[in-house]
Amino acid sequence: MYTIKHILNTSNDLDFIEVKNQEKVCYAKICINQGASLQELKLDGKTIIEDLSPLTYNNTYASSILFPFANRIKDGKYTYDGKEFQFPINETGNNNALHGLVFNKTFQIVKQEQTEHFASITLLYVEDKESVGFPYSYSIQIEYIIKKDSVDVNVSVKNTDTKAFPFTLGWHPYFSSSNLFNSTLNFESNKQLVFDERCITTGSVDINNEPHFEIKDKKLDDCFILNSSQTQFNTPDYKLLISASSKENFLQIYTPPKANTIAIEPTTGVSDSFNNNMGLQTLKPNEEYQINWNIKLI
């Protein structure tokens, strides 16, 4: 049987949901007031996602849902429908807007289910005011379905405004390995994006699609245009298949300053999509966009 417990930590003002199964081989921790992000995860006894301390969430954006844009916007500026807009700059060193607007929002629990075989939690954030740089109202719903060997992340964005708006969407999980040097990735791609010194996309280059991408001691902050919707992460202790339901599939890989940890980020857009239009989509009033990300032990 799976159990769901709501915990308010008054010492650090963090609001959590904990999910466990009776056999104690499955565990998930979701932080409600940090964008409903999945902060810890154990599947079938394997540690998949763990706390990144001493790194802070404000710097890692760990497991955050990235909306209305994934990655960066150069100088926080973009033009849409003939008008210029300016997002707040939250990557001050590079003068970029970074990772959207919902990573630090507090979500509300709207539904939860506990069964013998899975637990599900649905969380909702409603933005009814105009945001700086994004003067539109919207709602975003995140559903986590947690099983012994898999997690589904179902995200639904609805435009509740009277105007259409541009968007991309992404997920920023960090995965743990007992030995990242000896871990590999499998993904299908023959194009890698080129970034400038501020991590802004300037173009792409052709690459050979290697059967195994060896991580070793590489310092990564790279993005690939995927030819499929799946990425596989191979560690000495487990193999994880990461799947996306979207037509637009990009893979951002980042190694933070923490040993044996790697961000493997499925996104529908890239750095500066609001200006270069790569993966950029438009959501019309009253329309809804849905995406599923699934991670599964294999």
Image (tube, grey):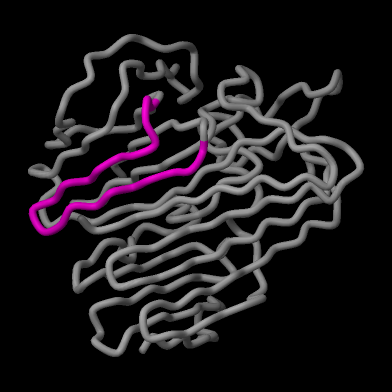
* Image-based side of 82 in relation to 202, left or right: right
Magenta-drawn segment: 226-246
Q: Is residue 274 above or below residue 175?
A: above
Q: Nearer the viewer, residue 54 or 271?
A: 271
Q: Residue furthest right?
A: 162
Residue at figure coordinates x 56%, y 36% from the top left: 92
Image coords of residue 271 (percent x, y): 52, 27
Residue drawn at point x = 91 percent, y = 42 percent:
162
Whole-percent x, y for residue 199 in the image: 46, 25
Q: Going 18% across and 52% down the picture, which residue do you hit?
A: 239
Q: Position of residue 178 (x, y in %)?
A: 12, 57
Most foreground residue, 110 or 74 = 110
Position above or below: 18 against 52 = below
- Judge whether 116 appears above or below 298 on screen: below
Residue 91 lies in quadrant? top right
- Does residue 98 belong to the magenta stretch? no
